[in-house]
Amino acid sequence: MRCKRFKTAILYFYRELNSKQGKEFEKHLEDCNYCKDYIKEFQKTNDLYEYIPLESPSPDTVERILAKVPAKRFSFVLKLRVGFATLSIILLVLGGYFIIENRHKPNLEWYGIEDRLEEIEEDIEILKEDFFANNY
Ligand SMILES: [Zn+2]
């Protein structure tokens, strides 16, 4: 059974709850298998990132990207954006590779990972809606 408090589970996972909220949520975790599993899956996903090597674009690539930007001086924010975009692409490619690579391993089917992915996608949608509702 799906639990409405999965968002709190995420905050709990990232230690974003204050100690009172944390204790209260730990009490909730004692009876809620959904949140317990949610945190476990979160941990697993988090652990996967440990195996993804961090790479930087070559100086050539950075130079080519910078050359396409109008002559205005680079702000820190823009550099940050280029870095973030590059990192996103790398993570996407590696993440995609990882998912494809693992799709054929039977043990992942035992986890019901397809169902979990669907649930996680739904959760992401809910979070997105909340985010936009609160920020725009
Ligand atoms: Zn729960």
Image (cartoon, rainbow, N blue to C red):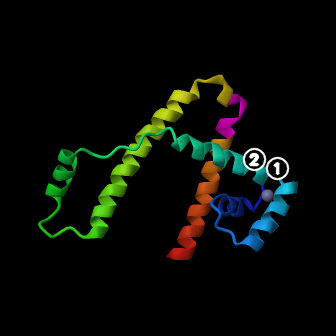
For the residues labelled 1 and 2, the Cα–Cα distance comes to 6 Å
The residue beneath circle 1 is 33
Callout 1–callout 2 Cβ contact below 8 Å: yes
Which corner quadrant of the image does residue 13 belong to?
bottom right
Question: Can you tell me which quadrant of the image ligand 1 is in?
Answer: bottom right
The structure residue drawn at horizontal position 59% and vertical position 56%, both measured from the top left corner, is: 124
Q: Amino acid at mark 1?
A: Asn
**Percent x, y of residue 77:** 31, 68
Query: Callout 1: helix, strand or loop?
Result: helix
Instruction: Indicate left or right for 114 with 25 as reference.
Output: left
Q: Note whether 103 is above or below 12 in the view shown.
A: above
**Percent x, y of residue 107:** 67, 26
**Percent x, y of residue 65:** 20, 53
Span shown in magenta: 109-115
What secondary structure predominates along the stretch shown in magenta? helix
Q: Amino acid at mark 2?
A: Asp
Q: Is residue 112 magenta?
A: yes
The residue beneath circle 2 is 37
